[in-house]
Amino acid sequence: MDVKKNGDVSFWYADIGGVPGYRPPLPGDIVADVCIVGAGYTGLWTAYYLKQAAPHLNIVIVEKEFAGFGASGRNGGWLSGGFSWSREKYEKASSRAGVIAMQAAMMGTVNEVISVAETEGIDADIRRTDELLVATNEAQEQRAKAMYAHARSWELSDERVGYIDAAQMRRRIAVHNARGAFVIKKVARVQPAKLVQGLARAVERLGVPIYEQTTVLSIEKGKVATNRGVVRAEKIIRATEGFTAGIAGHERLWLALNSAIVVTEPLSEKLWSEIGWDGYEVLGDAAHTYCYAQRTREGRIAMGGRGVPYRFGSKTDVRGVTQQATIDKLHKILTTLLPQTSGLRLDHAWCGTLGVPRDWCTTVGFDKQTGIGWAGGYVGLGVSTSNLSGRTLRDLLLGNDTDLTRLPWVNRTVRKWEPEPLRWLGVHSMYQLYRIADEREAKGLPRTSRLAALADRITGH
C-alpha cells in the first residue's frame, strides 16, 4: 500500500504545521542544581513538578533533537492510566496493598494530565473515552475475558473495567468478526505532539531552559558531558526512554523496541456511519502482536503496531522513516479489523522506539550516592506513566517520603539484557512465535497457542 508521506517524525507534527524550529543549544559549560537529560514527557513532567515545588532550583534540560522528538511526539495517543507491569512481579518486592496503591496512582494520571492541560491552556484534542481490547477469535475471546477477571481480582471495580459481548462491541465499533471486548473505562485520547509541545512551553514559562541540538555523550556523578559543553549538577535525571541504549554505559539497560503507525485520509460521514466509533474509544486487540488505534480529531484512523520489532544493537530509526513491509502489515491489520476502510488512502506512516526493561516492567528511581535518577522502560504506555514518573522523581529529588516514593516500582532493580547477537535473536524469535501463534488462533485454534507462552519465556515478557 502506497503512503503519501513516510517519516518526517510523525503525522502529529504535520497536523500542527510541521516539526518545530530548534531552540538554541547549550551555550557551553554551565553549572545547575538539576540537569535533566531528554525533553520528552518524562523530562518535561519532572521539570514541571520539580520547579513548582522548589522554584529556587536552577533546572536545565538538554535534548539531542527538539522537545518531543521521540516517542512523546510519535505515540498512539492513549492516555490510558495503564503501564507496563506485572502485578505479581511487583508484589514480590512489595505487597498486595502496595500494588493496589500503585494501580490507583497510575489510574489517577488521566485526571492529572487533563487538569494540567486545562490549567496551562494546552489544547491537545483530549477526549475522555473508553479503551476497547477487541477479540476476533475464540482464543482471543478467552484472553480478553481472562484480562477482565484478572483486573477484578486486583480490586478494580466495574466502574473501571468491564466486558462487553459481540453485539455490544459492534454497536460501538463495527469490527469484523468481533466476539467481545475487555473494556478499560475512564481513559482519554490525546494528540501527542500537541501535548508535549504545550508542556514544553509550560516548563519554559516556569523558567526552565530547554537546550536543544545538544547530544549527551556520557552521564556520571555530578556531570553531563555533551557535544556543546559540560553541565555540572548535583542531581541528574536520565529521561531518555527508547534512546537510552545510545548513551555510553547503558547499551544493555533497556532494549529499543520499534513501533509504527499509519494514518488514513479523513473518512466520509457515510463511512463513519458504517463503522460507528462515535465514542472515540481507543481501540486495541487481544492478538499477541497487538495493535492500537484511535479516531482522530479530524476524522482519520491512526493504526499502530509492531513492524520490524528491533534493530541490531538497539539502533533507532531516522526521523521516523519506516519500512514498506511495516506499512503493508499495518494496512492489512486495519482492513482486516475494519474492511470498510479498504478503499482509503494512507496519508502518513512513521515509527519510533520505546524502552523495554529485561522483565518488561517499568521503573523509576533515584540513587542518593550518585545523585542520578531515572524513569522509563514504559513499553509503549508512557503517556500516562511518564506523568506519575515526573511527580515521583520530584519527591525523590527533594528527599520527601511520600505515598509516591513508597510505591513498589521505585528503585526496583532489573538485570540487563544479553549482549548481541542474543538480544536480536531473542526479540525476533519472540515476534516470529507470536506471529505464528496469531495465525494458528485465527485459523481456529480454540485456545491460546503454546508458542506464545514459549515466546514469553524466551524474553521474560
Image: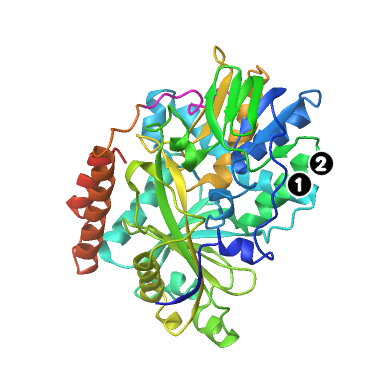
Query: For mark 2, what is the residue?
Result: 205
Label 1 belongs to which residue? 201
301 displayed left or right of 232: left
**Would residue 190 be visible to someone looking at this image?**
no
Q: Position of residue 344 (x, y in %)?
A: 48, 82
Name the dominant secondary structure of the magenta segment: loop
Residue 461, position as x, y percentages in the image: 32, 41
Q: Is residue 66 left or right of residue 27?
A: left
Mark carried by residue 341: none
In this rendering, the answer to whether 280 lies above or below 155 is below
Q: Amino acid at mark 2?
A: Arg
Q: Examine the structure image and report whether residue 413 is included in the region drawn in magenta.
A: yes
Is label 1 in contact with label 2 (beta carbons under 8 Å)? Answer: yes
Residue 69 visible within the image: yes
Q: Residue at x 20, y 45 (%)?
A: 454
Q: Position of residue 430 (x, y in %)?
A: 25, 48
Range of residues picked out in magenta: 405-414
Q: Is residue 26 magenta?
A: no
Which picture quadrant has residue 446?
Answer: bottom left
